[in-house]
Amino acid sequence: MKHIDIKEVLQNKELIGQTVTVCGWVRTSRNSKNVAFVELNDGTSLKNVQVVIDKADDPDYKDIPRVGTSLKVEGKLVEGRNAAEINVTPADITVLGDCPQDYPLQKKGHTLEFLRTMPHLRGRTNTFNAVMRVRSVLAQAIHSYYQDRNFIYVNTPLITGSDCEGAGEMFRVTTIGFSQDYKTEDDYDAADFFGRRAGLSVSGQLEGEMAATAMGKIYTFGPSFRAENSNTPKHLAEFWHVEPEIAFAELDDVIEVAEDMVKHVIGTVLEKCPDEIAFFDAHFEKGLKARLEELISHEFGRVTYTEAIELLKKSGENFVYPVEWGCDLQTEHERYLSEKVFGKAVFVTDYPKEIKSFYMKQNPDGKTVAAVDLLVPGVGEIIGGSEREADYDKLIAAMKERNMNLDLYSDYLDLRKYGTVPHGGFGLGFERLIMYTTGVQNIRDVIMFPRTVGSIR
């Protein structure tokens, strides 16, 4: 049906004095002697449009639409006290979908935990309405960033026969299911759809490298899947992943792209979502806007892993997880470095090879790899990347040390045989970027339908 977005009605001054048609859901309603008031929202704006119902010709009008009811309204747009509003009579209102009194979102102040129990409705709240708009703007900004810089957007497979991380924490894909018809696991795999074991991809990186060594600069933006039994505020079983891969690039080039991209997308959100950022600043993190503006106004810090360990050991902090060279940095360590030591985003480079993935370039010291993580205040790590190992023999050795099946990676290894080049890239957890940009503390609250261990509603 023909109608105008409420965002357009609130922002376009040329519509004042004209008859407009809007659709939306009732956020609040109240009745008085001569008029009634309805706040209507269609999801295009954090702000509602007020509909003023003149009861002069129908003083007995009592059928004020309840909260949650969907309406079509046609009336004259006029300047109100604080914003444009629509003047109508009861006859100008069409109920599209009535809402009973047991509508669960009638009251304000529901906790985010409670709202997770109703993923089908929580998008109508101010919080999730704002989160989803920020998410949309961030996604578009990411695409624009790479498209404007000659990166090619590629779609890597979601079903794969190899494990990018080498960790085995993959969801298995099968058409057979439970069966006692096979004597061995190899027999089972051979009889399955692909004739070999398959799983949902944990990352598009390996295929991304193949694309980059043909097209130079590529990026992927799609879902990844991790079958980790992790129930923390930072983990999802299904999440969205941004993964650029850059040929003819070393670690410093990867870091430069990562910093530039983060600053670009956050700057875009500050420009395009001022109402949403103000909302999150008021209700989720005081000083959020200032923090984001501060982030993009300075160069990010940089420190090696070895230097970071020394800083943590000398801090005097009583960390839950002890700090020693060779340990994997935990969130408490990451946040201390970004919040207390540097007071800004910081790149940590050159991690011990034992705690990083097989594909990372080995440094001349024989102990570390050319890896990088970007740590940001309030969240910790949001980017992990590296220069990739381009030396065939070194890559083979690293894979053998991890007892990996080289046959599963034959195509990947061929890249190091046929015109190998220095190359690198990184992965950005999209939901973690949204958390950082909004101040929302739980990753389940920045995606419409969170998939976590024990929960798939």
Image: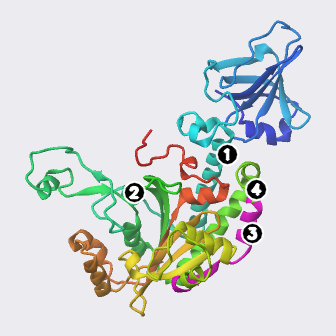
Check residue 432 for magenta coloring.
no
Mark 3 lies on residue: 294
The magenta-colored residue range is 288-308
Label 4 and label 1: CA atoms lie apart by 16 Å
Q: Please, what secondary structure does the residue beneath circle 3 have? A: helix
Which one is earlier in the sequence, the residue at label 3 or at label 4?
4
Image spot of residue 6 (x, y percent): 74, 36
Which one is earlier in the sequence, the residue at label 2 or at label 4?
2
What quarter of the picture does the N terminus occupy?
Answer: top right
Q: Please, what secondary structure does the residue beneath circle 4 have? A: loop
Q: Please, what secondary structure does the residue beneath circle 1 have? A: helix
Label 3 and label 4: CA atoms lie apart by 14 Å
Mark 1 lies on residue: 130
Label 1 and label 2: CA atoms lie apart by 27 Å
Check residue 299 for magenta coloring.
yes
Which one is earlier in the sequence, the residue at label 2 or at label 3?
2
Mark 2 lies on residue: 226
Label 2 and label 3: CA atoms lie apart by 33 Å
Q: Please, what secondary structure does the residue beneath circle 2 have? A: loop
Can residue 149 be seen by looking at this rendering?
A: no
Amino acid type assigned to the residue bearing label 2 in the image: Arg
Image spot of residue 38 (x, y percent): 78, 25
